Image: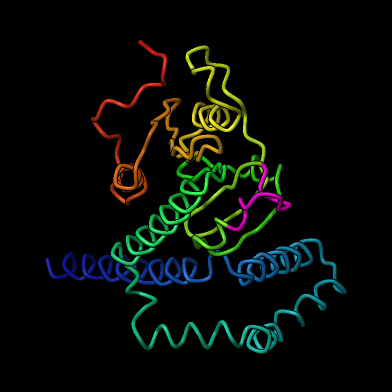
Amino acid sequence: MMGWDFDLLQILRVFIDIGIVWYVLYKLIMLIRGTKAIQLLKGIAVVLAVWLLSIAFNLQTIQWITSQAIDWGLIVIIILFQPELRRALEQLGRGNIFGRSARSEEEIIRQNIEAIIQSCKYMAKRRIGALISIERETGLGDYAETGTEINGKLTHQLLTNIFTPNTPLHDGAVILKRDKVIAAACYLPLSESPFISKELGTRHRAAVGISEVTDSLTIVVSEETGGISCAKNGELHRELNEDSLKELLQENLSLNAKTPDKKPRRWRGEK
């Protein structure tokens, strides 16, 4: 019986050990996600793969070169990524690495929603046409590649400036991913639905079109009327004010977002 208890304790200790290592690695990956350190990890993986192949096929010259790269790699990493390592240690001291919770994610979402609303309100008042597609679960990378890469932090100033008339990027869609403006002047697929009102232009058809093939949330600011609309799942919510736009964004972008039970607004002209 004592032997059984000892084995169970050993198994429990192994699972705890593996769990802690997995959690630490996961948090470190989340910390460096979206930074140039990701490219470094890819480079390390390539070097390790070449080293293993050189051992398997007895390629002594390549094995020696890769071994030297591995031996001196740690020092090179410390030198090249001193700012990132310092920031990571500072966050570790403040408890931020392992303390990034749903609360911090919700704060990022709240700031994103606020930036989008401020920009849309500004453009609607001045009748500046805009088309903003927000990535959710389905990636929009293929559509982002049709435009100009931005990869800038989402702010209402940047968003508004992109759509300012007579600027190089004002025509086309902006694609957002989390708290980043990924690309501008992007082409979106146009909807061929016969139920869309004839009074609606290309921006609205593009918003509905992208919502038919992805789960994105796409906002349109009309250049003619200044009206704000939002397309989701092939449906167009029209004549949104600040409060209704905020409610719709919160319903669909929050961490526990789910499809609302409310009946969507119909296109004008529908029965």
Residue located 61% across and 28% down the image: 202
Q: Is residue 167 magenta?
A: yes
- Horizontal side of 236 relative to 19 (left or right) equals right
Can you give x and y, in whole percent of width and height, for residue 4 in the image? Answer: 18, 64
Percent across and percent down for residue 152 are: 59, 63
The residue drawn where x is 57% and y is 47% is 175
Residue 163: x, y in percent? 61, 50
The quadrant in which residue 26 appears is bottom left
* Quarter containing the N terminus: bottom left
> Residue 46, position in %: x, y?
72, 64
**Is the residue 78 above or below the residue 120 in the image?**
below
Q: Is residue 207 left or right of residue 12?
A: right
**In the orientation shown, which residue stands out farthest toward the right?**
61
**Viewer-closest of 205 and 165:** 165
Colour convention:
rainbow
Closest to the observer, 70 or 151: 151
Q: Is residue 64 magenta?
A: no
| Predominant SS along the magenta part | loop
Q: Residue furthest left?
A: 1
Read off the magenta span. Answer: 161-171
- Quarter of the image where the C terminus is located: top left
Decide: is 259 above or below 158: above
Numbered disc total: 0
Residue at 75 percent of width and 80 percent of height: 69
